Amino acid sequence: MTADAPDRGTDGTPETRKETTILVVDDEAYARKFFRTIADDEHYGCDTVESVGACKTYLEQNRLPDLIVLDIRLPDGNGLELMEWIRSRHIELPIIVITAYGSIDDAVKAMKMGTFDFFTKPFDNLRKLKICIQNALEQKRLLNENRRLKSQLQSLEVFQNIIGKSRKMTTIFEMIQKAARVNSTILIEGESGTGKELVAKAIHNLSGQAAHSFIPVNCAALPENLLESVLFGYEKGAFTGAQKSTPGFFEEAQNGTLFLDEIGDAPASVQVKILRAVQDNAIFRVGRTTPIPVNVRLIFATNKHLSQEVAEGRFREDLYYRINVIRISLPPLKERKEDIPLLVNHFLSKYCREMKVEKKQFDEKAILYLLNWKWPGNVRELENFIERIVALHPREIVTSGDLANYVEEPVLISDGSFLSSTYEDARKAFEKSYFEQLILKTDGDLNEVANLSGIHLATIYRKLKSLGIKPG
Ligand SMILES: Nc1ncnc2c1ncn2[C@@H]1O[C@H](COP(=O)(O)OP(=O)(O)OP(=O)(O)O)[C@@H](O)[C@H]1O
Ligand SMILES: [Mg+2]
């Protein structure tokens, strides 16, 4: 075996595949054999290297071991220096130091550097050594566990403001976590108000870019020239009014995240420049011919169907393929009704707290009505609606009859889904929503419902019963 190649386990399988692996760094064959025997006894994996250089290469190229047993005197350097090198990269990795020349000096230095324990050769107390290895591994396990819990807590915090327990939203949460772990470009699609910006922020906050800026830019809000200058910056004198060189958002988002919202509305000239930036990781300021390197995570969002925009020639196909690496499609609210009660409660708490009023509540029937609305403006519309109610509703309980006061005209779900029903089912669904709306409008006054519908009161009672509607 050469000093550069780690020795594998005795049975020929790479030891790194075993669950727990110890790396022994020692140039003496008997010491390596000794630790391998201990590892075999305890069913740990054991890799061995013989020099400082081989140890560094090992740590750079392999999955990290769970424990390092490190000799101080090595052929190409000092184990204490190697320890410093390891500590600066993997602070949590436990190290047990061994030496044949156990001087108090080395021991003190090693302990100060955070060695887990210190042993001198020859090893006389096998039991003590085994316990020491067990304890070091247990400490590593606890540290890992702690880190895992911390990151779970962090993601809970990030997700706390994205409300949803529907299967569709659970899938979105999983996508967010996966997307945050990689650096790929992300495309978020969804109707207006479905939470695209919220999701983009969550990805940023969970990602390696979290310590840097998150810069949102609405590509639909600015005229072409201005958008270009804002994104890419400009040099002094590039155009009238350019009095000093100014960096754009690409540069300001350096090492962070640039969120390009409404990308479907970016004009063709800006699409070309964005494509170049995505391809080359570099941008050109307006009026400058040399590129500026940028390291920015890009998240795009759109409420259009980009593939359709491409098909109709309004969006560049090459840019579409470049940005459509990880796609997250946010479902409209009406496709995840089970989230509506949660969202209502969340926004009630939020606005009651903000406006310092006592917590209001929707009665069951009012919630039922909300479940049947179409919510074309999605969560944003629901949020605005709740804000209005908290500000204006004089009582603590909000009933179905109260709703009409805070909404122009509720749009009930009655779209193409009828077409997949039989005539009889479609008729029933229509009747149900018709009477529900009338009851809502008349605040449950059935005489008024009879008046407005031109149907006899007795027939109304029968209809409501057969449709399962309870008035008032
Ligand atoms: N799942 C959710 N939980 C809590 N609040 C949400 C959720 N989804 C959206 N919101 C809220 O709804 C509002 C609209 O969200 P956001 O701005 O992210 O939507 P959008 O998809 O970017 O809309 P647009 O296309 O109109 O820009 C925000 O106030 C946001 O906090
Ligand atoms: Mg938005």
Image: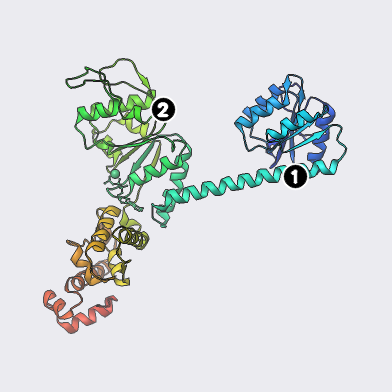
Residue 295, disc: 2
- According to the image, label 1 marks what residue? 134
Q: Amino acid at mark 2?
A: Asn
Which residue occupies the foreground of this view, 357 or 395?
A: 357
Along the polypeptide, which appears first: circle 2 or circle 1?
1
User: Where in the figure is residue 108, as x and y percent of width and height?
Assistant: 74, 32
Q: Residue 42's quadrant in the figure?
A: top right
Q: Amino acid at mark 1?
A: Gln
Which quadrant does ligand 2 occupy? Answer: top left
User: Where in the figure is residue 102, as x and y percent of width and height?
Assistant: 82, 29
Q: Which residue does the image show at 25% across and 35% down from the upper left?
A: 219
Q: Label 2's element?
A: loop
Mark 2 crowd level (few <14, some 14–19, many ≥20, 10 Å Cα): some
User: Where in the figure is residue 155, as x and y percent of width and height?
Assistant: 47, 48
Q: Quick check: 129 above or below 407?
A: above
Residue 221, disc: none
Count of numbered tags? 2
Which residue occupies the foreground of this view, 138 or 365?
A: 138
Q: Is residue 50 left or right of residue 86?
A: right
Rendered-image quadrant of the N terminus: top right
For the residues carrying marks 2 and 1, which lies nearer the camera in this image?
1
The outermost residue toward the bottom is 458
User: Where in the figure is residue 469, as x and y percent of width and height?
Assistant: 27, 76
Q: Is residue 236 left or right of residue 175?
A: left
